[in-house]
Amino acid sequence: MKKMKEEGINSNSTWWWLFDRGITASFFCIGVAALLVRAAVSIHPYSGAGNPPKYGDFEAQRHWMEITLNLPIEQWYHNSTTNDLSYWGLDYPPLTAYQSYVHGLLLRFFDPDSVSLYTSRGHESYLGKLLMRWTVLSSDALMFFPAVLCFVIAYFSGQSRGCKSSISWHIAMILLNPCLILIDHGHFQYNCISLGLTVGAVAAILSDREFVASVLFSLALNHKQMSAYFAPAFFSHLLGKCIRRRNPILEVSKLGVVVLGTFAVVWWPYLHSVESFLEVLSRLAPFERGIYEDYVANFWCTTSILIKWKRLFSMQFLKFLSLAATVSTCLPSMVQQIRDPNSQSFLYALLNSAFSFYLFSFQVHEKSILLPLLPATFLALEEPFIFQWLTQYAMLSMFPLLCRDKLVLPYIALYGIFVLIYCSPDGIPFTRKTNSCASSKSFLIAFLLFCSLVLHIIYLTLTPPAKYPFLFEALIMLLCFSQFVLVAVYANKKQWTLSKSPSLIGKEKKSI
């Protein structure tokens, strides 16, 4: 007890008994709880359940297993009589296709009918659904969880033991993030793989292992192209480090070789001809869907209430406009990283880069909010309010989608778990120190939370006017967009503020 007091650790802390057993033991206990929560969510419906003819994301993932198992690799992205791309054709990079093949082997071993060519379309047997859910659960346990452990070890290394008393709370916030659980284990996707690779890359950056980071992030890009949301942050940070070394050109060249080599290995089956390569590439950029779909809380969809982008401008012009807006909003964050590439501001750069893509890039989906939310989770200890605020509105922005999937019950349950952990005693070390906000600010926060609650209730209980069938989705979109913009502005300002502090660069100087 005396030793604990000397190290500045509260013996009454909710998380102390976990931390006292070390990082690995803490992680194991919380990880088991997180897996049980995921398993509980997976017993609920999924995207497109019992909704022919195309069903939903669950059927898309199953169909990719069917295609990769039964057709030669060169035909996976090729439109033909045996592979109709209009029926859930593969539209992710090759690493997703390889993952589908491996998972398909498991399904074929236990339930061959679930992945048989043609006849398995819309397959929804109990065993088939159980096996599909297990593939996501195992992917989470094998990819995302170990990456989070590596991140936590890298993030807390070198910090005082007093700071480490919050490590279990931080692990819980990352592993029990309600948005990722609802999308992967409710709606049904494999974001845990690409996000896990990204988390591993971030951990490598924090540990000054640039080559490992380059390989892992290249694999993330080759699993889901949306990982490009983080590309400006990785590129500018690594470039900033390289130009400070004795031979910058050599350092950049080495990283370039690592990245190109990783891409070459993943894309090797499609590099034998330009036609095959372009065939895969064309599937990764769905420009024909338009600049936005549904009611996503980004700039283009929100402003379309006043400016009918699709009607007024050509597709080509919208592509250019979207690219220009995304790059210009990324640029300040990239410049800061090139000028001062330190680890702490890098986490903010990830958040700013992801927000630039989410708010302004072409063809954004509601689920894409998972990407800005990931670095916000990394910063949960430094920015507890920003983290919980973004999580709340990320959940609200996906609420219409999750309602369509009949996931309201797990939505409420996971939100409750999130609030309980977030508000746990001694869980947030800096909240009490910064609890003197003005009454007007407190009123505004309370008002926005009230609006969020009202919109939840309205969406569940009322029917929109026949003239405006998507009125409630539009209101949710407007509220979430306003909060996302505020968080993005704050994060950009904070990143530049950090660059003025010389105390943050210590770790980087050791490797330069």
Image: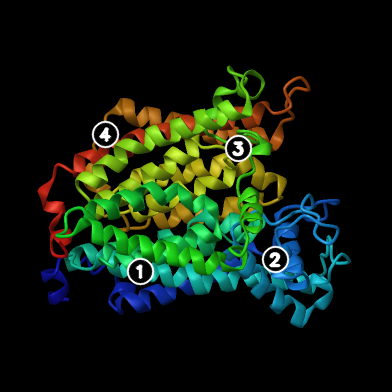
Instruction: Answer yes or no: is residue 404 visible.
Output: yes
Residue drawn at (61%, 56%) of the image: 274
How far is mark 3 from mark 1, CA to CA?
43 Å
Q: Earlier in the sequence, mark 3 or mark 4?
A: 4
Q: Is residue 124 above or below residue 55?
A: below
Q: Is residue 55 above or below residue 3?
A: above
How far is mark 3 from mark 2, CA to CA?
47 Å
Circle 1 crowding by C-alpha within 10 Å: few under 14, some 14–19, many from 20? some
Label 3 belongs to which residue? Answer: 456
Indicate the amino acid at tag 3.
Answer: His
Spot occupied by residue 304 in the image (x, y as percentages of width and height): 59, 23
277 with respect to 469 (left or right): left
Residue drawn at (53%, 35%) of the image: 452
How far is mark 1 from mark 4, CA to CA?
42 Å
Q: Secondary structure at mark 3?
A: helix
Label 2 belongs to which residue? Answer: 74
Please name whichever residue, 472 or 416, is drawn nearer the observer in this view of the structure: 472
Q: Earlier in the sequence, mark 2 or mark 4?
A: 2
Q: Secondary structure at mark 1?
A: helix
